[in-house]
Image: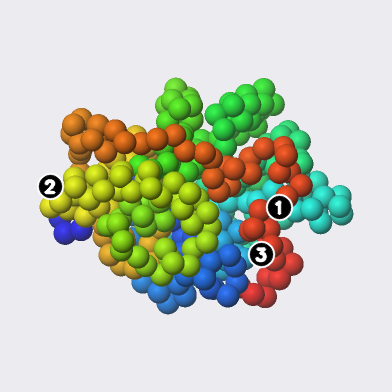
Amino acid sequence: MEGSKMQYTKLGLSNLVVSRICLGCMGFGDPAAGQHTWTIGEDETRTIVQRALDAGINFFDTAIAYQSGTSEAYLGRALNAIAQRDDVVVATKFLPRTASEIAEGVSGQQHIINSIDASLSHLGMDYVDLYIYHMWDYNTPLKDVMEGLAQVVAAGKARYIGIANVYAWQLEKANALAEREGFPKFVSVQNHMNLIFREDERETLPCCTEEQIALTPYSALASGRLSRRLGETSKRLKEDSYAQLKYDATAEADARVIARVAEVADARGVSMTEIALAWLLAKVAAPIVGATKLHHVDGAVSAVDINLSKEEVSYLEELYVPHALVGVMAQNKPADSGKEHVWFSNAKYLQNEDKN
């Protein structure tokens, strides 16, 4: 990271100026409180956040679903202790209504208000800069969702809204409704994209480019696969069953791309992390990069300085094969509307605030 200087960009059509690297906070939180067992504790979280701030990162992404709200709590306490609120851009996300909320008659609007209030309580903040619709809710009318988000913005609890795990047609439908009704429009899209998962290049990437909507993709390093040579492993690679679900089925095809990342990195004398992120930085506003160790932050920041040649880009992209949608996007269909995502089993954040 020595000598690296962070770059900044406007987040789509918003007034938010964000670092080209967004620190993903899914790795923060109580390991006993949620889906993941490999997350780090509060002291380690503060150390990582301090390193990110020192490196010029001002953009932080978390979610109420991450470790039952403890990711938000750890991030919020770290930022409140070591940063000025106006100097950072904080994004968090909300889930669709749960089956129990639907049965109890909780409206889409009220669910969003309850969710933002819980997130702000965890974060210890009066507002978030970006409030993100985490996954499409087929059980709630779109107008209810957009109206709920409009109420949150009007109340000053969020400055802008974003969306995640979305098809291009859903994004266009939502923003068209917002424009017609006078609601805020989505300024960013957070989808799954990296060198071994490039399906968003078909429709979402050109759609966002045309509409000046910022892309802030997650899984930028494929849960560590693009930062390690074939055969190398880590605690996360061993224990992250969700990432295994996303990548193990295509491991053979992906290995050929990963090998090329290592080749280009060796030729340049840099890390695989830098090459994989440099490729993504040329296409999107700000990749979301998780960090549970200091060198994860350093590698991400160093990638900002790298400009790949057309020949290098072609070499990295050449062996890609089409991939089926996986993870949250695999559930983005009406047939799964009655099947709750694994995060819902840990969604205690509205009832059990004492955990945080």
SS assignment at label 2: helix
**Residue 293 visible, this orientation:** yes
Q: Count the marks: how many? A: 3
* Label at residue 346: 3
* Label at residue 340: 1
Mark earlier in primary sequence (3, 1): 1
Q: Quadrant of the C terminus?
A: bottom right
* Label at residue 168: none
SS assignment at label 3: helix
* Depth check, front residue: 134 or 253: 253
Front disc: 2 or 3: 2
Q: Residue 86, position in %: x, y?
A: 43, 54
Residue drawn 25% across and 32% down? 314
Q: Amino acid at mark 2?
A: Ala
Residue drawn 69% across and 48% down? 96
Front disc: 3 or 1: 1
Mark earlier in primary sequence (2, 1): 2
Q: Residue 231, position in %: x, y?
A: 31, 61
Determine the CA span between mark 3 and mark 1: 11 Å
The answer to whether the residues at label 3 and label 1 have Cβ atoms under 8 Å apart is no
- The 10 Å Cα crowd at callout 1, few under 14, some 14 to 19, many 20 or more, is some
In the displayed structure, 10 sits above or below 54; it is above
Determine the CA span between mark 2 and mark 1: 46 Å
The answer to whether the residues at label 2 and label 3 have Cβ atoms under 8 Å apart is no
Mark earlier in primary sequence (2, 3): 2
Residue drawn 42% across and 77% down? 43
> Which residue carries the number 2 mark?
267
* Depth check, front residue: 328 or 148: 328
In the displayed structure, 35 sits above or below 147; it is below
Q: Amino acid at mark 3?
A: Asn
